[in-house]
Amino acid sequence: MLVNSTNSTCILIFIYFLHLPGGLTCQNCNKLLSNDLDYVVEHCKLCYYGSRPDKSFAFVCFKCDYHTYQRYHMKTHVRIHLGVKPFQCNLCDYSSNDSRNLNRHKRIRHCVES
C-alpha cells in the first residue's frame, strides 16, 4: 500500500508534536514518551521494565525510583519531572504541582482557609 505525501507529512507533523524536542524517555524501557501527563502516567502503570520492589505497586516512575499504588500520587509526582504547576495562587505568583500545596500556601502566606 502506498502512502501519499500529504498523509506522510501529516504523520510526521503528528509525531513531531507528540514528541516535542526535549521530550521524555523512560529510563526503564528507553521508550520515547509524549509530554502529555495522562499518557506518561499510563506508561508508568504499563511499563513492564520498571523495578517494582513490591508487585502490588501499580505505578513506577519513568524517570526515578519513585513508585506508588495510586494514580493520583503518580500524576502529582510526574508533574515534578514535567515541570507542570497547574495550581496557581490568585493572590500572588505562587504555583504548585499539587492542589494541597496551594491550599497550604494560601493558609500560611495569606491567612486564607480553603
Image (cartoon, grey):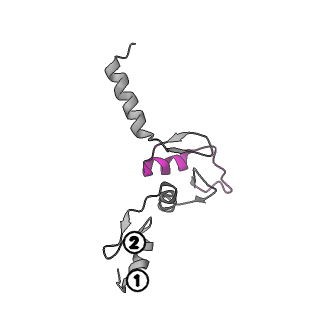
Is-magenta flag for residue 63? no
What whole-number distance in Å separates the C-alpha atoms at marks 2 and 1? 10 Å
Quarter of image, res 88 = bottom left
Q: Which mark sits nearer the N-terminus, 2 or 1?
A: 2
Residue drawn at the location 62% of the way across and 56% of the way down: 56
Q: Amino acid at mark 2?
A: Tyr
- Seen in the image, is 19 located left or right of residue 6? right
Per the rendering, the mark at residue 109 is 1
Using the image, determine if residue 5 lies above or below residue 103: above
Q: Which residue is mark 2?
A: 94
Quarter of image, res 20 = top left
Q: Say which quadrant the N terminus sits in.
A: top left
Q: Say which quadrant the C terminus sits in.
A: bottom left
Return the residue found at the far bottom. Answer: 111
Residue drawn at the location 48% of the way across and 54% of the way down: 82
Marks 2 and 1 in Cβ contact (< 8 Å): yes
Q: Amino acid at mark 1?
A: Arg
- Residue 57's x, y, as percent? 60, 56
Q: Nearer the viewer, residue 45 or 8?
A: 8
Q: Secondary structure at mark 1?
A: helix
Count residues near mark 1 (Cα–Cα under 10 Å), then give few for <14, some for 14-19, many for 20+: few
Residue drawn at the location 49% of the way across and 44% of the way down: 23
- Residue 44's x, y, as percent? 54, 50
Q: Nearer the viewer, residue 59 or 55?
A: 59
Q: Nearer the viewer, residue 53 or 23?
A: 23
Per the rendering, the mark at residue 90 is none
Using the image, determine if residue 22 lies above or below residue 64: above
Q: Secondary structure at mark 2?
A: loop
Q: Which residues are magenta?
A: 34-57
Quarter of image, res 4 = top left
Count residues near mark 2 (Cα–Cα under 10 Å), then give few for <14, some for 14-19, many for 20+: few
